[in-house]
Amino acid sequence: MNVSRRGLLVAGGAAGVTAAAPGRAGAHERGRRRVRTGFDRLAADGYAALAGRRVGVVTNPTGVTSEVRHVVDVMHADERVDLVAVFGPEHGFRGTAQAGGSEGRYDDPATGLPVYDTYLKSGRALADVFTASGVDTVVFDIQDVGARFYTYIWTLYDCMVAAELAGKRLMVLDRPNPVTGRAALGPVLDRAFATFVGREPIAQAHGMTVAELARLFNAEFLQRPVELATVRMSGWRRADFFDGTGLPWVPPSPNMPTPDTALVYSGTCLFEGTNLSEGRGTTRPFELLGAEGADRRWAEAANALELPGVRFREAYFTPTFSKFQGKTVGGVQVHVTDREVFDPVRTGIGLLVTAKRSWSGFAWRADNWIDKLTGSAKVRTMIDAGAGTDDVVGAWEADLAAFRAVRREYLLYR
């Protein structure tokens, strides 16, 4: 741990706009706890932290208020905010692009604001975008789903690096981790496998909010920390699932339609690294998995593992796009029966192990994408060597324990 960096984080950026530690829930709405996001709290304070600033917002369709108004539309209409630019990540600011795509540079029809494309830009190239936009403060407000390979957290990381290069301030408006922030799970990235689905050594299911990750990134990974401010939520606790927040769910990407998808995603997204369908092109992406020739034997083998909080149903489906488009495939549907004990990463490993054993056509993607998703070659090589679920999970425990110890220093909520 670099003590001087941590001191800079506390004394400089993050202490500037952090709220008091959230207490117990206040008002309830339909029996659910009322959570106020970082944006809600910033607005309630009259945008004081943005006074005199030329502001640009990194956001997507998830950047909404509790009344389901987009934060860009709200700020643009408020004379207290000098909003001059918007920055769109993967899928775009308004969310029109599929996976691996973005919207490019355009002027937003609703506000007239220039929208700049950040997707696949980093370092000096992204710093030049910030400079060209004329902003002095970059605000990040995107709903994450809690998985290392969900690219928005690396958009945040890249924006932090670029903002420092361009001499800009960066502010993170916090939102819930929809699958709770109770624990970090899964393998920790080996930097030799760093890509846009994992820049730095964090756990596969990191168990943090975006503001907490920003604090960790700034102190642990950035060579030159950015001037960072964070605006906390109020009313959120680490044990909260998204349906306990009272907040509206907006799909963060086209194949993340519900919080149920997010619950399984950090495990079943691993099937992107195989020749099986991960359910894209169905109404239950990442909950339906399958391939031509797979059958009931997979569900039987997976259920025999007796993984906590989950059961598997023999399923048949026809993807409308992506793998096996227009073809009927067999496989499993993942049914979470007790989310309090469900471990998505262990479940994903168990499904990989049993898929390989029960279906003769199983193969990894030729580019070994599974290594980028898991953060090393260990999962692939151990499964190929015949290792079981417990053996594979046990192989990352030491690294995970070390990450958990670092992670604790940057948590903002109880």
Image: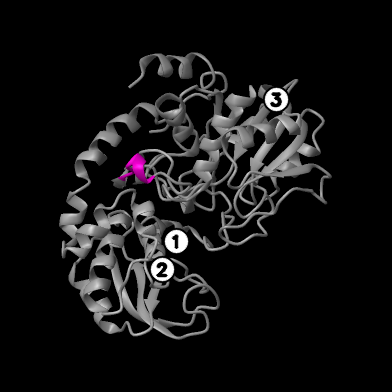
Determine whether, in the image, residue 117 is placed left or right of residue 1: right
N-term-proximal mark, 2 vs 3: 3
- Which of the 4 image quadrants contains residue 1? top left
Q: Secondary structure at mark 2?
A: loop
Q: Amino acid at mark 1?
A: Asp
Q: Is residue 153 magenta?
A: no
Give the class, few, some or many, for how many residues have Cα within 10 Å of label 1's Cα (few <14, many ≥20). Answer: some
Residue at point 41% right, 39% down? 208
Look at 69% across and 36% down and name the residue there: 129
The x, y position of residue 37, in whole percent, is 57, 39
User: Of residues 189 and 25, which is closer to you in this image?
Assistant: 189
Name the mark nearer the viewer: 3 or 1.
3
Residue located beneath label 2 in the image: 287
| Mark before the other along the chain sequence, 3 or 1 | 3
Seen in the picture, residue 226 relative to 358 is either above or below; the reply is above
Q: Is residue 100 visible?
A: yes
Q: What is the secondary structure assignment of the residue under circle 1?
A: helix
Question: Contact (CB < 8 A) between labels 2 and 1?
Answer: yes
For the C terminus, give its image quadrant: top left
Q: Nearer the viewer, residue 334 or 149?
A: 149
All told, the count of numbered labels is: 3
Identify which amino acid the numbered label 3 is placed on: Asp
Identify the residue position indicated by label 3 in the image: 136
Residue 235 visible in this rendered orientation of the protein = no
Label placed on residue 260: 1
Range of the magenta residues? 188-193
Q: Nearer the viewer, mark 2 or mark 3?
A: 3
Disc 2 to disc 3, C-alpha distance: 42 Å
Q: Position of residue 190 (x, y in %)?
A: 32, 42
